[in-house]
Amino acid sequence: MERYESLIIKESIIPLAYAYWISPIGKILPITDKFGQGKHIDSIIENPKAFGLTVDEVQAMYDVEGETMGIEGRAREKLIKQLINQGWIRIRRYLKPEMWTININRITPKIKKILYSFAKTMVDQHKIKYDDVKIDMINKVIRTSFNDIVNESLLNENIDDGFELIVCKTVDDLL
């Protein structure tokens, strides 16, 4: 575990949420709405610039699919896949059954660090050890738990380089 000790979460707590975006540079955005839930697409629409997009690009994707902006259809799926291919991580918590999905492009040393830090927070701060976690990649799915991620079942090589995770309070903080 010592090789991961330089992984620092700049804020002491990542709030427990039903959804998160993690940027390619390690900024974590818990996604919530007034009902405590929240949709990933809403964050993109609220501030496309924070995701490296423009309002026109987002609207064009919806127009191509013949959908109203914000609908959870084909355009949303394409936008999310585009971001994942650019290194963004999408995390969603489901309650029935109690499980998490983590969408990534592929496992890289940087992604391993982010997943380790996120899992360690879930285990240490929120006492979520054994929930099912499905890491969903383009051509592979890994089923695990946060406890297994923390205990190096997924992280089996030395990848320490002082990576820092930063908790964002709003989508604007991603900029």
Image: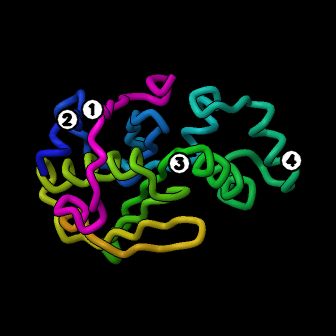
Which labelled disc corresponds to residue 162? Answer: 1
Coordinates of residue 123 in the picture (x, y in percent)? 15, 56
Instruction: Point out the tag, 4 or 3, that comes first from the N-terminus.
Output: 3
- For the stretch drawn in magenta, what is the main secondary structure? loop
How many angstroms separate mark 2 from mark 3 (CA)? 29 Å
Q: Amino acid at mark 3?
A: His
Q: Dots 1 and 2: beta carbons under 8 Å?
A: yes
Residue at the disc numbered 2: 6
Tag 4, which secondary structure? helix
Tag 1, which secondary structure? loop
Residue at the disc numbered 4: 63
Read off the magenta span.
149-175
Tag 2, which secondary structure? loop
Q: Tell me the residue at 36%/65% (across/down).
A: 100
Q: Amino acid at mark 4?
A: Asp
Q: Tell me the residue at 28%/57% (across/down).
A: 157
Instruction: Point out the tag, 4 or 1, that comes first from the N-terminus.
Output: 4
- Residue sitting farthest toward the front: 158
Instruction: Point out the tag, 4 or 2, that comes first from the N-terminus.
Output: 2
Q: Residues within 10 Å of mark 2 (few under 14, many from 20)?
A: few
Q: Quadrant of residue 132?
A: bottom left
Q: Tell me the residue at 41%/37% (across/down).
A: 29
Q: Amino acid at mark 2?
A: Ser
Tag 3, which secondary structure? helix
